[in-house]
């Protein structure tokens, strides 16, 4: 038996020693492909495209915007509509109000004079969203969308969304520092109540091609768990709906499989996803993106905490506890907590209330900035659509 254990440990040691790091070629290659995200909006809303470059897994950066490009929407009647870069990598135009009988494409010229063109695409009208709703489940809410096309012409749909919510810091601070003293906060200086937002991180598709009627009923959009701060006070979601052609639906389906459904031996294998936009100066260069032409439909709903089960309680994302920040701490008052942690212009702690014992002002009850300053994760500016 002892000999068997020795053999086992020798084999285990050999296996551990023989491990070598493996860096796939895809991680090392200097691939820098253009990624084009957006649709040509034929309606009164703005048309916006995000241009970026692919990033190697080992690059150590999260975003690589394509800046300084010339971006234009063109029609097959030789009409052009330029887009303006509003922030790095984002190119936008006001509502184009395009002729629905024409075809359109996107033209991009980058700062290194590389040119990209999409195929001309006919307008695919998007029917209105009938409603956006939610279902209360045991562990949160499931949001969904309803829509239909009375003309039975759409059949292929894509949705994305933007969430906005009102949330609070764990503790409310009544004081603000000017670097030398503490003063009472004015309403404009409050940092207890904030707004935050997020966008869709997954691809949501739907098809009625195999149905007798073009009706989408309770298509799942996203979920919010019962412990989320998103539904602590008030939550809003703006759902956008896009009609797709058959080819566009196939492209988005392949993209979804390649980005969201990989990782196990039972999943689909990665494959090349070719869109309808091409590099004309270097035809062999892959370009990631598919340009659709449609009128984007959208609908917003609000959900208040009072509409949800009262037993649901949000979980604050940080471990918070109250602290005592004293003017005099230790032998011979070796440390002044207030001067060290609260008075600097970028305090690590915020004062909540004074500590007064037997008439003596000893310091403040305080808490870490992440537990008192909601602007670390949001903004105090109320969105214009909020109600």
Image (cartoon, helix red, strand yellow):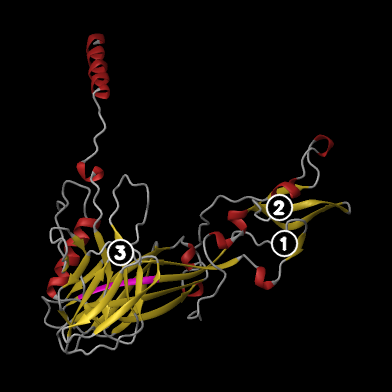
Residue pictured at 41% horizontal, 70% vertical = 163
Say if residue 289 shows up in the picture: no
Residue pictured at 65% horizontal, 62% vertical = 172
Q: CA distance from mark 1 to mark 2?
A: 10 Å
* Residue 158 part of the magenta-drawn span: yes
Magenta residues span 157-162
Indicate the secondary structure of the residue bearing disc 2: helix
**Foreground: 67 or 22?**
67
Q: Residue furthest top?
A: 3
CB under 8 Å between discs 1 and 2: yes
Numbered badge on residue 342: 2
- The residue where tag 1 is placed is 175
- Which is nearer the N-term, disc 1 or disc 2? 1
Q: CA distance from mark 3 to mark 2?
A: 48 Å
Residue pictured at 22% horizontal, 86% vertical = 79
Numbered badge on residue 123: none
Q: Is residue 361 above or below residue 96?
A: above
């Amino acid at each position: 038996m002892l000999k068997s254990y020795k053999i086992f440990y020798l084999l285990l040691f050999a296996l551990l020693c023989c491990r070598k790091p493996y860096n796939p070629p895809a991680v090392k290659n200097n691939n820098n492909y253009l990624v084009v995200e957006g649709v040509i909006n034929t309606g009164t809303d703005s048309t916006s495209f995000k241009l970026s470059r692919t990033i190697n897994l080992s690059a150590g950066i999260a975003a690589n915007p394509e800046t300084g490009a010339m971006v234009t929407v063109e029609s097959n009647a030789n009409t052009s509509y330029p887009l303006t870069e509003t922030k790095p990598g984002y190119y936008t135009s006001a509502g184009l109000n395009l002729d629905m009988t024409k075809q359109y494409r996107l033209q991009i010229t980058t700062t290194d004079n590389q040119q990209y063109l999409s195929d001309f695409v006919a307008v695919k009208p998007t029917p209105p969203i009938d409603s956006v709703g939610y279902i209360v489940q045991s562990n949160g809410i499931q949001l969904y969308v309803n829509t239909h096309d009375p003309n039975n012409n759409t059949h292929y749909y894509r949705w994305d969304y933007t969430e906005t919510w009102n949330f609070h810091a764990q503790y409310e601070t009544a004081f603000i520092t000017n670097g030398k003293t503490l003063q009472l906060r004015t309403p404009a200086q409050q940092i207890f109540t904030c707004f935050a937002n997020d966008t869709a991180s997954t691809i949501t598709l739907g098809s009625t091609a195999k149905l007798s009627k073009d009706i989408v009923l309770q298509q799942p959009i996203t979920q919010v768990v019962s412990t989320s701060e998103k539904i602590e006070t008030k939550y809003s979601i703006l759902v956008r709906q896009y009609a797709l052609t058959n080819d566009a639906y196939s492209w988005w389906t392949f993209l979804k499989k390649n980005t969201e459904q990989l990782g196990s031996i039972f999943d689909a294998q990665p494959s090349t996803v070719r869109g309808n936009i091409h590099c004309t100066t270097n035809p062999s260069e892959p370009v990631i993106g598919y340009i659709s032409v449609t009128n984007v439909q959208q609908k917003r709903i609000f959900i208040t905490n009072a509409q949800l089960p009262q037993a649901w309680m949000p979980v604050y994302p940080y471990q918070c506890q109250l602290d005592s920040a004293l003017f005099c701490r230790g032998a011979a008052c070796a440390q002044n907590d207030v001067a060290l942690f609260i008075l600097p212009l970028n305090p690590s702690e915020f004062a909540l209330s004074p500590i007064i014992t037997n008439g003596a002002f000893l310091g403040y009850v305080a808490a870490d900035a992440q537990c008192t300053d909601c602007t670390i994760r949001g903004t105090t500016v109320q969105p214009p659509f909020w109600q």
